[in-house]
Amino acid sequence: MSDITLILLGAGNSTRFKSEVKKQWLYSGDIPLWLSVAERFGAMELFAKIIIVSSAEDIGLMKHYADYTYVQGGETRQASLKNGLEDVTTEYVLVSDIARCCVPEAMIRRILDARKEASCIVPVLPVTDTLYLAQTPLDREQVRIIQTPQLSVTKTLKEALQTDHVFTDDSSAVASMGEKVYFVEGAHEAHKLTTIDDLKKLPCIKAPSKRTLTGFGLDIHPFEERKPMVLCGVQIDVDYGFKAHSDGDVAIHALIDALLGAAGMGDIGELYPDTDESYAGADSTRLLSDTVRKIRTHGFDIGNVDMTILAQAPRLLPYKEKMKHSIASLLGIRPHLVNIKATTAEKLGFVGRKEGVTVHAVANLTYHNWKEK
Ligand SMILES: Nc1ccn([C@@H]2O[C@H](COP(=O)(O)OP(=O)(O)OP(=O)(O)O)[C@@H](O)[C@H]2O)c(=O)n1
Ligand SMILES: C[C@](O)(CO)[C@H](O)COP(=O)(O)O
């Protein structure tokens, strides 16, 4: 059994990346970057456990992809690391930034092979440019660029972090205890993905696959007297609406399920439970906007959507154009990529008896093509 646990830190906000998509969720081929990093380390079969530290929202989604130990992060890298360490029981812990997505295997082995040398083993690069601190030139031979992963004795690192002082990496925390830090040669491929321009420096990230992902959604709501009716975010001029926990926009609910289905993100009930009082009477356009945010920040672009509304009543033809524009604007796509069909049920079944409405929706997504932006 290995005496090393791997912690991958991925709870950052990608602020400096300045893109709608979080850097951890850019697709490389058919998988998001965080998963390609976990698989790269995992393939070495060197670790007792792999812990991925991420935000609560991301963990909910990550669980659909692979079975790792997921831990919720904190406000800073250090807070995230402390949370991850709570789950570590092995003698050593290897900590890496998910943002360093192309760490070469040889560099990982160099770090692990040096484990007996000190309480913390750190990969470094020399500085090749002249350096100044304010107006004073520095001796660059004394300066090093620090990378991750870093290997620490778990007990020492845990103790070093029992402080309010904020360190930018594990080695500075260990060094603050008067413990020895041992440097091994880093690698340019282990460069950290911080800004969009860094993508050019990281050739291990493949272009996203051109796969189209299709999702299907269906929802049914019975009518209720004396309620406003809203479909696709558009007010329908009748004196009855839908019985529901939210505003009952059955068309938007079906569309949310189609989008979540295509993204592999579960269903509307998991994300916006009808047992949650905060969604009582909720405006469904706000739920759809939140779904769209989730989809875009997690690496997908919306292609087109198609919906069929099965309603014996009310008559929807006069509203279809307005509905199309409403949905297009909520999805942030052009109107021709939204198709809305309405049909009666030929007086058959509950729809035919005018007891309620059913909506079917289909949505297509692609991986956000960061390579061609
Ligand atoms: N609260 C935080 C902040 C950062 N990290 C992780 O620490 C690593 C180094 O951080 P950085 O590259 O700065 O990532 P972000 O914090 O996402 O970037 P930014 O500072 O631009 O927001 C990243 O893998 C990041 O996900 C973390 O786990 N928890
Ligand atoms: C840990 C680190 O990657 C070592 O170089 C770096 O300090 C992280 O800094 P950031 O500001 O959190 O990107």
Image (cartoon, rainbow, N blue to C red):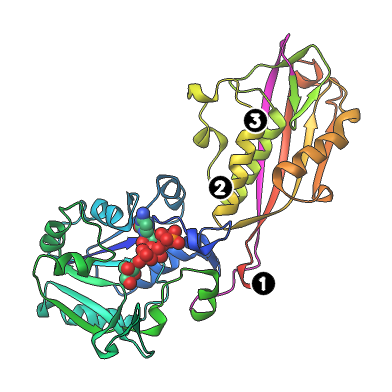
Q: Residue at x 65, y 16 (%)?
A: 243
| Mark 3 lies on residue | 284
The question of residue 209 being in magenta is answered with: yes
Please, is residue 104 above or below residue 262 in the view? Answer: below
* Sequence-earlier tag: 1 or 3: 3
Please, is residue 186 above or below residue 4 in the view? Answer: below
Q: Nearer the viewer, residue 151 or 173?
A: 173
Instruction: Say which mark, if any, is on residue 160.
Output: none
The local secondary structure at tag 3 comes to helix
The image quarter in which residue 180 lies: bottom left
Ligand 1 lies under 8 Å from the Cβ of mark 1: no
Query: Residue 134 appears at what percent x and percent y?
Result: 35, 77
Tell me where the magenta segment starts and ends, as one range: 202-228
The span from disc 3 to disc 2 (Cα, nearest Å) is 15 Å
Side of 284 relative to 239 (left or right) = left
* Sequence-earlier tag: 3 or 2: 3
| Mark 1 lies on residue | 372
Q: Could you tell me if the residues under marks 2 and 1 are in contact, i.e. CB atoms within 8 Å?
A: no
Instruction: Say which mark, if any, is on residue 294.
Output: 2
Side of 217 relative to 198 (left or right) = right
Q: Amino acid at mark 1?
A: Glu
Residue 356 in view, yes or no: no
